[in-house]
Image (cartoon, rainbow, N blue to C red):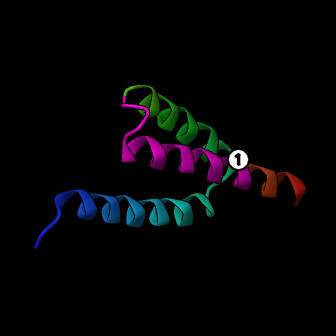
Amino acid sequence: MFDEGESMLELFGALTNCLSRAIAQMTIRQLDSYEAEVLEMLRSCDDESPAANAFRSAILDIASRRAHLFLQ
């Protein structure tokens, strides 16, 4: 049987993985711009939603990428 909630979680998981790979290729300028957009989207959604969790994950990936670029 089709479980819409489970399918949405799988979709957000896949999207989060794609975002992580994209973030890993960004420059500092791109990270700054993208982070501002993600923070704005995070503010506009429910704190407990799968989308909020995906946005938080993206923020962590951005911070990690920024640290990696700083250390290079």
Q: Which residue is drawn at 65% across and 43% down?
A: 29
| Horizontal side of residue 28 vs 57, given as left or right | right
| Horizontal side of residue 2 vs 15, given as left or right | left
Look at the image and tell me in which quarter the C terminus lies: bottom right
Residue 25, position as x, y percentages in the image: 61, 63
Residue 24, position as x, y percentages in the image: 63, 63
In the depicted structure, whether residue 33 falls above or below residue 57: above
Name the residue at the front extreme.
1
Q: Which residue is drawn at 46% across and 65% down?
A: 18
Look at the image and tell me in which quarter the N terminus lies: bottom left
The residue carrying pointer 1 sits among few (fewer than 14), some (14 to 19) or many (20 or more) residues within 10 Å by Cα, namely some
| Horizontal side of residue 27 vs 9, given as left or right | right
Q: Which residue is drawn at 80% across and 51% down?
A: 67
Residue position marked by numbered label 1 in the rendering: 63
Amino acid type, mark 1: Ala
Q: Which of 59 and 70 is in front in this view?
A: 59
Question: Which segment did they paint magenta?
Answer: 45-65
